[in-house]
Image: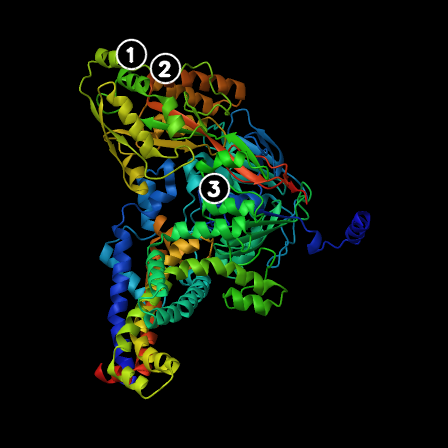
Amino acid sequence: MFGFLFRRIGLVIPTFIGVSLVAFFLIRLLPGDPILLMAGERGLSPERYAELMGRYGFDRPIWEQYAGYLGSLIQGDFGTSIITKKPVFEEFFALFPATVELSICAMIFAVVLGIPAGVVAAVKRGSGFDHGLMATALVGYSMPIFWWALLLIIVFSGILQWTPVSGRISLLYFFPSVTGFMLIDSLISGQKGAFASAASHLILPTIVLGTIPLAVIARQTRSAMLEVLSEDYIRTARAKGLSPFRVVGVHALRNALIPVITTIGLQIGVLIAGAILTETIFSWPGIGKWMVDSIFRRDYPAVQGGLVLIALMVMVVNLIVDMLYGLINPKIRHTR
Amino acid sequence: MKSTTRLLAATILAAGLSTAANAKTLVYCSEGSPEGFDPAPYTAGTTFDASSKPVYNRLVEFERGTTNVIPGLAESWEVSADGLEYTFKLRPGVKFHTTDFFTPTRDLNADDVIFSFMRQMDQSSPWYSYAGGTWEYFSGMSMPDLIKSIDKVDDLTVKFVLNRPEAPMIANLAMDFASIMSKEYADKLEAEGRMADLNQVPVGTGPFKFVAYQKDAVIRFQAHADFFEGKQAIDDLVFAITPDAAVRLQKLKAGECHVVPYPNPADIEALKSDDSVQMMEQAGLNVGYLGYNTLMKPFDDARVRKALNMAINKQAIIDAVYQGSGQAAKNPIPPTMWSYNDAVQDDAYDPEAAKKLLEEAGVSGLKMKIWAMPVQRPYMPNARRTAELLQSDFAKVGVETEIVSYEWGEYLKRSQDKERDGAVILGWTGDNGDPDNFLAVLLGCDAVGGSNRANWCNEDFNKLIMEAKTVADQEKRAELYEQAQVIFKEQAPWATIAHSTVFMPMAKSVQNYKMDPLGSHRFDGVDITE
């Protein structure tokens, strides 16, 4: 197990350097630069422009800039935002818990609904439920997030007034952030109604962000189950006279879960991408929206630092998923 | 029952207990996050709305709802006869905010004023580079060249000495970059090695004091009890950051916010007929234009520019692009600005006359480029669509056009190029309500190769606007600017397109809100009914 772990961590280092390289050059490939955007319609004299470029070190040769950047990265310095003048690391972790909280809720929503739905569809293959579910999943997968979110807001917040429109908690509640997770902080604050308010604010963004993973997980579970259910050992289990629940729930599901867990791991990237739109619409103060703003403003240090940190997080999650695999299926530990 | 409640409330107030239950909270659903809370390093209105407007004051202020300059932290000022010395008498007894993180020990004095400006000017000050050293407005308004020195005469008197007379100086000092900070607070931060906090947890003299900012989510302010004009009617001011316009609208309808800026143009008609919403509107202090490159042939000939202007069906652009919420522009300055010359006649839409004029100028088979901005601005909601309409208008007079566009930063840079090929769509929103801020910045000879995108340098025009800079008397200045506008129209360096209208929906309970012609969002003087 440890050998496996070390091999996997060994892979993380070249990936990390690759990501820093891509993050550094990708944002610089975009036309325009932060100084021009700051000056706006007024424009800048060439002398002033050169002075400001020099102040941020953007006039140095690009390889020298990258070397300097990599050097600071290794020392754990992720740079300082050109716009807010705050350390990127601090900015990132002020916003990251909001994204994590929303992503976890969306993932729970997708798993809790997706796996049982997929199992039932596989067991009742060809039934009305199966066809209905697969059609719904296809619709869910193709749904434009922006449109879906606004539709839910108009119906549930506007017309029915069941949920709040946007934000993380009602403005009536005001308490210091301890963990950054609103559900936990609202409980710690001890303010009456705070937790319920935080939870109600999570409903719509969770549904919106969880829709695509839900569709993918349901489809993946169904096909994995179908494959497993046709295996000989399932027939044997049935022949032994085990209850249908045991056959499906224990023998089939446990084996079908392996590709499903891979899918769930891969959905983490999808969640980050979905978070950009979801966070913008629901005024959710997470890293998705922050990254987009930083890109628009050509805030090089923020974009670079943000990308590297996100990549690190995704790598960690994938590592955890791989280890889970090992736990579920001991064969994998040995073959790798 | 009601009278009992009232009695109870009165008793609580009399006891001097301001309880949360009685607090009046106004929620403003702002469109974006502030970049920081020190206004001077930034240029975005979103940042000023959350920093300079609620937290700070300036020596002089814009009167709410107008561009008139009125006394602020300075109760009076004198300008020397040669226009080189401005002496400000500070208001005595002005209190800085007392907050969780800072307790001031003294009132505002001349040191605060000097600190607020010198940090942007004196490169040897440790504060000069604390926020990157980009004092864009300070340098954009030519302050480093203009200000010779700022001297403390006594504790409550400050003298600005200039290198040359500059009539718009007073209006400049009402701008956001001229906000007055607490030197005592800055000294404390410097001593504690927390200089960055000046930009994160601000202390000012303004109507509201800063309480907390949760990044990208909520900014909380509280009324400043010792504000020099008295405490505000609302107790708490909350900015709920809501980037999406459709969501802002839903929040307004659901009662989650009181005031929302920048509604989608498509929603305006529905909002106007909504009984639960009051809709304010005001002509924006802006202009959208098409700037020819007057250095390139054949656009160096005024007849060619004039002919193209006559070929433009402006009303069609107002209808299609501004969806009716704009008015055709004939002058480079908007009609709400003093010195606007209403006697100027616009070039009437007349394709036949335009063709004739082009022939007269010896131009045939003209091919040109039209530059369309890639972004939406209040003065230009859709540059691409405008360019398409211009393209079809110009085609009718035999001019073939190609529409080009670049990423916004590139667009701004390339459009400054003197060798630029083509006419550029751009615009401007006023900074300080002074005509100099349009005419000199956008059309002065000094700005050629910079913000003068037409690269137009007309001696007669330039003489007038330069003279107007040095004259103190506003009536005299207005006369000079009126003449300048006549020359502008004759010479036609731009096709003036439109001045847009700004809309501001808010809940019926909001009282006394005044729209700012300069485009900011201010909540001093605003009240809400329960």
Is residue A80 among the parts visible in the rendering?
no
**Which numbered disc flags the more N-terminal residue, 3 or 1?**
3
Q: Residues within 10 Å of mark 1 (few under 14, many from 20)?
A: some
The picture quadrant where one finds residue B511 is top right
Q: Residues within 10 Å of mark 3 (few under 14, many from 20)?
A: some
Query: Residue B147: horizontal and vertical position, in percent?
Result: 47, 36
Q: Quadrant of the N terminus of chain A?
A: bottom left
Residue at mark 3 to residue at mark 1: CA–CA distance: 42 Å
Residue named by callout 1: B353
Dots 2 and 1 on the same chain: yes
Q: Quadrant of the C terminus of chain A?
A: bottom left
Callout 3: helix, strand or loop?
helix
Relative to B97, residue B77 above or below? above
Callout 2: helix, strand or loop?
loop
* Tag nearer the camera, 3 or 2: 2
Residue named by callout 2: B348
Q: Which mark is residue B45?
A: 3
Tag 2, which chain?
Answer: B
Query: Residue A52: horizontal and vertical position, in percent?
Result: 34, 47
Dots 3 and 1 on the same chain: yes
Q: Is residue A260 left or right of residue B31?
A: left
